Amino acid sequence: MSTPSPLHAVHEALGAAFTDFAGWAMPLRYGSELAEHKAVRTAAGLFDLSHMGEIELTGPDAAKALDHALVGKLSAVKPGKARYTMICDTDGGVLDDLVVYRLAAEKYLVVANASNAATVAAELRERAAGFDVEVADRSADLALIAVQGPTSAAIIREVTGADLDTLAYYASVPATAAGHDVLLARTGYTGEDGFEIYVDGPLAAEVWQALTAAGAPHGLTPAGLACRDTLRLEAGMPLYGNELSADLTPFDAALGRVVKFDKAGGFVGQAALERRRDADVPEKVLVGLVGTGKRAPRHGYAVLDADGTEVGTVTSGALSPTLGHPIAMAYVPIAVSGPGTALTVDIRGTQAPVEVVKLPFYQRPA
């Protein structure tokens, strides 16, 4: 049986269609996913992300433990800031991609994907052995609510009173919402300006309702996981299980920049990642594909070269609501990875023409 979110009753009252996602019953959509997607691009969307995993590391060696456990240099992150990073196995394969917040000098919050939360918590406990740090899985205690879109700052400012002029992207600050203490972060997964609010689960409904009331004049719309996926695809953001997996390294996904080798004591997977970094030519690279018409490439569809030979596989694809044409990401050999390269995708027996483009597909206006 799927685990309900702390906001399940709220979603039911809104008429949400639910889906099982990594063992959680989460809202897929409330009405039209196209309308929800467009609301995020033009105004703001309200998301329940309580399925995400949250693991706290507290203690004098918290920074050292994370430097050892993850590929990033978390000791270099200042309190109040956050960093996108990954946890890899000894062979360099990605176990999950993460956002890590440094809440204080000796306290971090690691946010993991729902499907990998238990694995990440277990790995962090194992890798923290020998360090003076406590690892606590807070996933069952915390709810996570996101407000994403051009009007999100106005909504968050009204509800929290926080000074958003000094809250940079990938930063967080303690705040108050609906009279409750929360962690307010300027992070998101949509390609828009946006905020994420971490709050104790039993208090989540009050925060949701406060955001709903404040957001009404600003076009705030409840949004489900379906539009979250098309939003992140347009922004060229990877999804674990699609663009990232234990069979791929950060370098395969063109994310080698998140791997920091200048850390005292080394880290799990370092030797394998050094070999991958130093390889002359990668076997495959992640690219963007754009097509025409209304038939979109989907996950698992074959990518073909000009001779009709299969050269890759689509990892994510959809008809872009913002751009109005099909978009996809795929792993292909470097020989056919250059922008402008003409390829095709086998869409249920029909070879649909596509062109390689540089990611992302969409960037919000400056």
Image (tube, grey):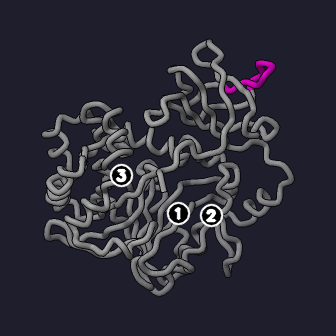
- From the viewer's perspective, tell me whether residue 42 is left or right of residue 262: left
Q: Is 238 drawn above or below residue 72 in the view shown?
A: above
Residue under label 3: 149
How would you rate the neighbour count of disc 3 (Cα within 10 Å): few for under 14, some for 14-19, many for 20 or more?
many
Residue type at the position of mark 3: Gly
Is 290 magenta? The answer is no
Question: Which element carries disc 1, helix, strand or loop?
Answer: strand
Which quarter of the image is occupied by the N terminus? top left
* Closest to the observer, 178 or 87: 178
Residue under label 1: 84
Q: Residue at x 64, y 56 (%)?
A: 255
* Closest to the observer, 84 or 63: 84
Among the 4 quarters of the image, the one containing residue 343: top right
Q: Residue at x 36, y 52 (%)?
A: 149
Is there CB contact under 8 Å for labels 2 and 1? Answer: yes
Is 307 magenta? The answer is yes
Q: Could you say which disc has been placed on residue 258 in the image?
A: 2
Residue 161: give x, y in percent of width and height. 22, 72
Q: Is 134 drawn above or below residue 208 in the view shown?
A: below
Q: Which residues are magenta?
A: 303-310
Residue 204: give x, y in percent of width and height. 20, 58
How would you rate the neighbour count of disc 2 (Cα within 10 Å): few for under 14, some for 14-19, many for 20 or more?
some
Earlier-in-chain disc, 2 versus 3: 3
